[in-house]
Image (cartoon, rainbow, N blue to C red):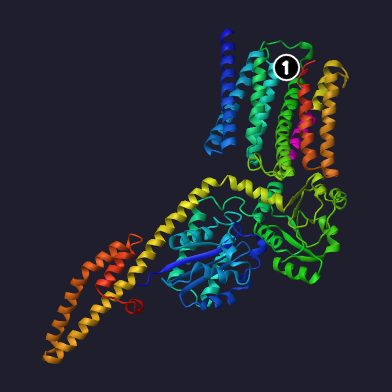
């Protein structure tokens, strides 16, 4: 009998250094990677998620599923020594895979626990998988359940409530400095992804405007258009430092962009209004001495990380609650999965008896002459006999289906009724 | 008069107990964030204000003039002024955990008043004038607002220190934003300073009436003038040079600390 199996293999920020993660074959885009997976015939359904913190592959198939090693080979491609793979890579099966996937979706496995981006990334990856016809009834259900689990975790626990990611930590700090962000101006220096995200977060909180400064003006204009703000050159920032309240810097420059001596005289012109510098660049863009100026606050990426960690410590209680929700949903899904195993057997059983009835009826009708009415009576009788006959085995199957891991009993029914692979697969 | 006096004492003890319980509740709210304790703390502090007011009225009946002329009366009136200023402020603004910082100050002043001799000292008829109670109550009310500025200043400095050190700790989530505290300080200092100025003017008039001269170069007078000048400087700097943030907060704290000294020789 074909037992549905789920396998999840992957690497994440906990197990694998960034230098390995960024080389993985599948990080180059979904299309090629999904196409490579479709070559494996045993993989009936598959799904791939790739973010900067993780690459994971979920496969559903029958007993002849590709081995974990084969899947890892797909994941790693040419990277590294196959013997080292298992050191980076984790593999989960069936309900463990479900649990892990739900944890990822609920952002319990994220670098910054509780951040909301991961759900968007999972949905995006799902869109690609669906376009490639990679997902089927099982993975569709798994994904939809993961969305609802994530939603439950978000609404029933406080895990996403306080500063949960670097950029929301920045927002929280800005609020502690400025109170309301309504009339505040943001100056974005450089166009890094993190800085963009932080600016977007601040816009979401209602800041008045964003000014984008970049070495290349075209890029600044393009980014400014997205934020409906202005653009300027890196050499002009002194003018804008006078009016800005929040400065986010993330250039690739190896030298300091803003020096202590540059800002100090500006404070008088600013009438000492607070100035919040966020330095997301590595190496740093902003002079660490800026923090010594009165009413100037400077946070670099590590400081923000610390704020996040401190917030995280207080959320352990919430995390316990969140894991309980994930466990609940995992149990529900696993039960459904077990039930799914039984479904082909039930269908095969029904179609087999139907086929026998039809065959025998045809034989009998060839020998005796019956009126239309009589014929209907006989057909009805045969249907009743088979229904009554099948009643017990069906009840038996359905009852067992509630308990996971009863594959043996399904197999028993399969062999008693001689249901072969072909019949089961047809159904 | 024995009966009347024990009545006053009972009222004083009731006021102290209610204020102390309110302060403890404010602290519990600060530490644990239970909304219920905050609500009760505020109710009790309001009850304390009612009791304080009654005590002042009772004392007024007892001594026959505005009760601001002995140490006991002045310090008690000071506590009442801060409570009054706090509730008048709260009508317009809501500042997170402000009560936690103001209530201990009120508590401290009321307890200090209780430990100072409550003996009624008849006022020297020479000093009697309409300007004396006006001057004293205006000055003390000004102190009340400046006291709120002091609490705001302390809160600001605590919050600022955490933000500067880049280690988000105990106070970060419990204290309001720097901007809100800066506004609070400015608001309280501006009102306090305005009333203080009126207090100074009436004080000068009183001095003229009683001693025949406007300014006698007494240490207390010099000190008061210095404090007035310090606050004048702060307000001037705010509007001309844009003094803000840490410096404003530090000045509000320093100004009030200086001011507490003048309370000692309150009647000389």
Residue A91 makes an appearance in the image: yes
**Residue A328 in the figure: left or right of residue B142:** left
Residue B194 makes an appearance in the image: no
Q: Position of residue B30 (x, y in %)?
A: 60, 36
Q: Residues within 10 Å of mark 1 (few under 14, many from 20)?
A: many
Secondary element under disc 1, as helix, strand or loop, is loop
Q: Which residue does the image show at 67% across and 21% down from the upper left?
A: B76
Q: Position of residue A300 (x, y in %)?
A: 74, 52
| Frontmost residue, B122 versus A332 | A332
Q: Is residue B66 magenta?
A: no
Q: Which residue does the image show at 68% across and 57% down from the upper left?
A: A202
**Residue A139 in the figure: left or right of residue B45:** left
| Frontmost residue, B189 versus A94 | A94
Magenta stretch bounds: B185-198
In the rendered image, which quarter is residue A250 located in?
Answer: bottom right
User: In the image, is residue B19 above or below residue A142?
Assistant: above
Q: Position of residue A97 (x, y in %)?
A: 47, 62
Q: Is residue B192 magenta?
A: yes
User: In the image, is residue B47 above or below residue A59?
Assistant: above
Q: Position of residue B148 (x, y in %)?
A: 70, 33
Quadrant assignment for the C terminus of chain B = top right
| Frontmost residue, A248 versus B55 | A248
Residue denoted by label 1: B69
Q: Which residue does the image show at 71% across and 28% down from the upper left?
A: B141
In the rendered image, which quarter is residue A220 located in?
Answer: bottom right
For disc 1, the chain is B
The single residue placed furthest to the top in the displayed view is B2
């Amino acid at each position: 009998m074909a037992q549905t199996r789920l396998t999840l293999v992957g690497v994440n920020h906990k197990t694998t250094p960034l230098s390995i993660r960024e080389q993985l074959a599948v990080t180059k885009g979904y299309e090629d990677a999904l196409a490579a997976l479709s070559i494996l015939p045993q993989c009936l359904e598959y799904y791939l998620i790739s973010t900067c913190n993780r690459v994971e592959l979920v496969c559903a198939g029958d007993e002849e599923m590709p081995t974990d090693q084969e899947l890892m080979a797909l994941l790693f491609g040419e990277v590294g020594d196959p013997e080292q793979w298992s050191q980076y890579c984790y593999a989960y099966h069936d309900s463990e895979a479900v649990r892990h996937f739900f944890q990822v979706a609920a952002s319990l496995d994220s670098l910054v626990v509780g951040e909301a981006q991961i759900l968007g990334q999972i949905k995006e990856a799902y869109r690609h998988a669906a376009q490639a016809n990679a997902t089927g009834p099982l993975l569709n259900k798994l994904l939809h359940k993961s969305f609802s689990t994530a939603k439950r975790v978000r609404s029933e626990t406080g895990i996403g409530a306080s500063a949960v990611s670097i950029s929301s930590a920045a927002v929280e700090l800005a609020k502690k400095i400025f109170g309301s962000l309504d009339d505040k101006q943001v100056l974005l220096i450089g166009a890094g992804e993190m800085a963009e995200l932080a600016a977007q977060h601040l816009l979401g909180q209602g800041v008045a405007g964003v000014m984008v400064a970049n070495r290349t003006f075209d890029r600044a204009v393009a980014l400014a258009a997205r934020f409906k703000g202005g653009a300027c050159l890196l050499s002009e920032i002194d003018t804008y430092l006078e009016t800005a309240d929040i400065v986010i810097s993330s250039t690739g420059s190896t030298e300091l962009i803003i020096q202590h001596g540059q800002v100090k005289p500006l404070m008088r012109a600013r009438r000492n209004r607070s100035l919040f510098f966020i330095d997301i660049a590595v190496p740093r863009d902003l002079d660490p001495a800026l923090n010594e100026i009165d009413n100037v606050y400077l946070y670099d990426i590590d400081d923000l990380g610390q704020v996040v960690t401190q917030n995280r410590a207080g959320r352990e209680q919430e995390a316990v609650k969140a894991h309980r929700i994930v466990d609940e949903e995992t149990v529900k899904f696993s039960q459904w999965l077990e039930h799914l195993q039984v479904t082909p057997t039930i269908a095969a059983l029904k179609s087999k008896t139907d086929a026998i009835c039809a065959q025998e009826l045809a034989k009998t009708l060839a020998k005796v002459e019956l009126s239309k009415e009589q014929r209907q009576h006989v057909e009805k009788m045969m249907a009743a006999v088979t229904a009554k006959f099948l009643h017990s085995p069906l009840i038996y199957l359905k009852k067992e289906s509630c308990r996971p891991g009863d594959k043996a009993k399904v197999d028993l029914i399969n062999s008693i009724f001689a249901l072969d692979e072909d019949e089961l697969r047809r159904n | 008069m024995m009966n009347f006096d024990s009545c006053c004492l009972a009222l004083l003890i009731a006021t102290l107990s209610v204020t102390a319980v309110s302060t403890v509740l404010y602290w519990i709210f600060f530490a644990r964030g239970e909304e219920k304790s905050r609500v009760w703390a505020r109710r009790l502090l309001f009850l304390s204000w009612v009791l304080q007011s009654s005590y002042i009225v009772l004392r007024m009946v007892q001594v026959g003039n505005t009760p601001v002329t002995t140490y006991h009366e002045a310090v008690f009136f000071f506590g009442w002024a801060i409570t009054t200023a706090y509730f008048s402020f709260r009508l317009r603004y809501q500042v997170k955990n402000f009560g936690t910082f103001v209530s201990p100050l009120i508590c401290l002043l009321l307890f200090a008043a209780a430990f100072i001799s409550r003996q009624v000292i008849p006022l020297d008829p020479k000093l009697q004038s309409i300007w004396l109670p006006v001057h004293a109550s205006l000055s003390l009310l000004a102190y009340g607002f400046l006291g709120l500025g002091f609490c705001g200043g302390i809160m600001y400095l605590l919050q600022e220190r955490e933000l500067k050190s880049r280690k988000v700790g105990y106070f970060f989530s419990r204290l309001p934003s720097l901007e809100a505290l800066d506004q609070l300080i400015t608001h309280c200092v501006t009102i306090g300073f305005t009333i203080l100025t009126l207090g100074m003017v009436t004080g000068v008039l009183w001095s003229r009436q009683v001693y025949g001269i406007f300014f006698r170069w007494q240490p207390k007078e010099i000190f008061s003038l210095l404090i007035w000048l310090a606050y004048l400087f702060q307000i001037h700097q705010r509007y001309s040079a844009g003094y803000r943030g840490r410096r404003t907060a530090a000045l509000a704290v320093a100004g009030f600390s200086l001011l507490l000294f003048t309370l000692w020789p309150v009647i000389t």
